Image (cartoon, grey):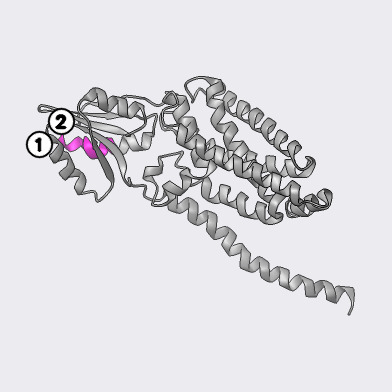
Amino acid sequence: MTSAATGRGRLKPRLLALFVALPILVALPVWAFTWASASPEPHGLPVGVVGSPGAVQAIEDQVAEHDGAFDLRTYDSAATATDAIENRDVYGAIVTEGPDRKLFTASAASPAVAEVLTTTFAPPSEGPAPVVDVVPADADDPRGSALGSLVLPLVLVSVITAVIVLLIARPGWEQIAMIAVAAVVGAGVAVAIAQGGFGILGGDWTTNSVAPALTIAAISGTIVGLVSAFGRFGFVAVAPLMLFLGNPWSGATSSPYLLPEPAGVIGQLLPPGAGATALRNLAFFDGAGASTPLLVLSAWIAVGVAGICVGVLRRSDPGRELTDATRPVMDAMQG
């Protein structure tokens, strides 16, 4: 058999694999992004209620019409409801004092949620109730779109960092050190641009840098760790997960409670969503509610470090296995 015939014989299975894989590769991101952004509605959105038993019952009756959209939590006073908002226990509160009703919101938590609460509980047709923005969004980013746009660049930087580390770092501590340095530098640049350049973040620069640093370390570390432990499958499994699910399901541009179920829950268990929530809470709520997303990021980092350690223990020929693990990436980069 001639070499040309052999080449054509090898090409046919590859073309078949391409035609099978291409629709899946296109469908996954299109479905994930479209599903997350189409017709956002609240799902179990926590909202505080203050008032007499009769007033609370009237609000509960109103909420019942929305079939699980809101999770009402009763508070004794406007002050305790305000504390709950500032501590990230609820997104807003309906405060009824006699004949008067006030709506407390926190646009820093989510401008989209603040708009939903205003539309639902202070309808213009009935004369809008006074709206108190307890924790306002930054004046330079009132819609929260700029803050939400940070997620995709951080994911891309993390994937690129993982590729670079796999290509040039020796397995083990050198990989861990390079990931740590890249995370710190990347986070510093991101916060310098977002907070120093555009002023879309509040709070302390150093504190705000913690969330993007852990996000970069979690994503890149997990990729490097799983590639080290399982070869090329680690990259194929993790990178698309972060790009095509973690990014659109992060809730960064709206809120996890406005995403269809269970996308909001899953998104908060992935580094992009956890990182976005941690950054928002650090920047605008003095760290309230940041412990859970930071623990999620730390868990992913631990998975990455464990994978790197497993890879070192299993690797009999580090150079050969590293090349094998990164060959799909290099082939893709070379076209």
| Residue type for callout 1 | Gly
Place of residue 251 in the rendered image (x, y in percent of width and height, measured from the top left):
44, 42
User: Looking at the image, do the residues carrying marks 2 and 1 touch, with CB atoms under 8 Å apart?
Assistant: yes
Residue at 78%, 55% in the rendered image: 324
Residue at 54%, 31% in the rendered image: 211
Main SS of the magenta part reads helix
Q: Secondary structure at mark 1?
A: helix
Q: Residue 296 vs residue 57: left or right?
A: right
Place residue 115 in its image quadrant: top left
Between 230 and 166, the one nearer to me in the picture = 230
Instruction: Please determine whether, in this image, residue 45 is positioned above or below residue 4.
Output: above
Q: Residue 142 vs residue 180: left or right?
A: left
Q: Secondary structure at mark 2?
A: loop
Q: Which image quarter holds the C terminus? A: bottom right
Cα–Cα span, label 2 and label 1: 8 Å
| Marking on residue 54 | 1
| Marking on residue 68 | none
What is the residue that sits farthest to the bottom in this orientation?
1
| Residue type for callout 2 | Gly
Instruction: Please determine whether, in this image, residue 321 is positioned above or below residue 94.
Output: below
Place of residue 162 in the rendered image (x, y in percent of width and height, measured from the top left):
69, 42
Place residue 49 in its image quadrant: top left
What is the residue that sits farthest to the right in this orientation?
2
Residue 121 magenta-highlighted: yes
Do we see residue 9 in this rendering? yes
Q: Identify the magenta region.
A: 117-126
Place residue 96 in its image quadrant: top left
Residue at 37%, 25% in the rendered image: 136
User: Mark 1: few, some, or many residues within 10 Å (few <14, many ≥20)?
Assistant: few
Place of residue 20 in the rendered image (x, y in percent of width and height, measured from the top left):
62, 68
Q: Name the residue that disc number 2 marks.
A: 51
Residue at 66%, 50% in the rendered image: 226
